[in-house]
Amino acid sequence: MTRIYSEEVELYDLAFDWAVSAEADWLVERLGPACRKVLEPGCGTGRMLEALARRGLEVTGIDISEPMVAFARARLAGNGVAADVRVADMTDFDLEGRFDGAICAISTAGLLSADELGRHLEAMARHLLPGARYLVQQGLAGDQAELWRSEWEAERGEIRLHVVFEALERDLDRARELSRSRVEVLTGPRAGAVVEDLHTTTYWTPATWRAAIDASPFAQVACYDGGLPERPPVELEQAGGYLWHELAAP
Ligand SMILES: C[S@@+](CC[C@H](N)C(=O)[O-])C[C@H]1O[C@@H](n2cnc3c(N)ncnc32)[C@H](O)[C@@H]1O
């Protein structure tokens, strides 16, 4: 497991401390008024769990990383937010009861291979009520998409970080992409520390994603461009770096 998802979860939480409030409002709207119980696989440090719980939903999160789960539990309890957060593998898990909806944020699904995504969707279908919505944020690459690079700074109290995530190479035959994250601590007690990780992810295109969903128990009912403030619906065949896929459970 990469360090940023295991030993360095505090740095992860700070690096991804984006304002999630507008996105959480939109997610609650998409999940619908009947949705009370929500599951987030790959919940990380719980930033989305907290935002959804604050909007009145009963939230459950699972993550394969024990440090992530410990951080999420402490953060939610410390902020007086009720949530059930457990260590579990999103490709094979068994929770009691069924959920009215689910979300999966910031290309977490891309961390899974195509086979693992298939097993994940089978597991999700077993945990959702018929017709429940599963909102999955996953970028899809267009033809000849260039290698991407994101760079930003994050700040909390006296700690300031410089963060770079960038794709290094692609194996189109195996539909895999190698990327690197680099988090440098600029100020604060750990100034000068650098945490670098290599990530291997699945390189999804509109066609391969469509085939994966068609082979799963879910039906894709819509797709939205999450990179725009209004998050407008887009064609299912469209590529994009920040797409939200709306899947309906069987
Ligand atoms: C990009 S982070 C996203 C975290 C969180 N959803 C957020 O929005 O900040 C991906 C998360 O997926 C978790 N993860 C990776 N593989 C997993 C698996 N097979 N089962 C459960 N969680 C997994 C990692 O530990 C990490 O916390």
Image: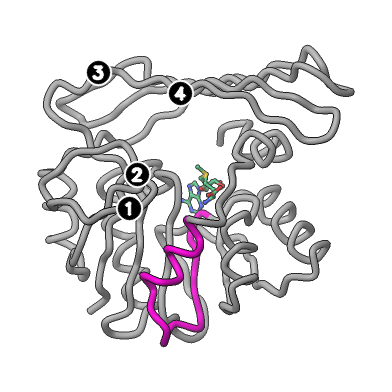
- Marks counted in the figure total 4
Picture coordinates of residue 169, whole percent (x, y): 31, 16
Q: Which mark is residue 228?
A: 2
Picture coordinates of residue 211, whole percent (x, y): 11, 52
In the image, what residue type sits under mark 4?
A: Ser
Which residue is under mark 4?
A: 150
Residue 27 part of the magenta-drawn span: yes
In the image, what residue type sits under mark 3?
A: Glu
The magenta-colored residue range is 23-42
Q: Are marks 3 and 1 in contact (CB under 8 Å)?
A: no
Q: Are marks 3 and 4 in contact (CB under 8 Å)?
A: no
Which residue shows up at 59% across the image and 42% down it? 18
Q: Is residue 174 left or right of residue 85?
A: left
Which residue is under mark 3?
A: 146
Which residue is under mark 1?
A: 231
Q: Are marks 2 and 1 in contact (CB under 8 Å)?
A: yes
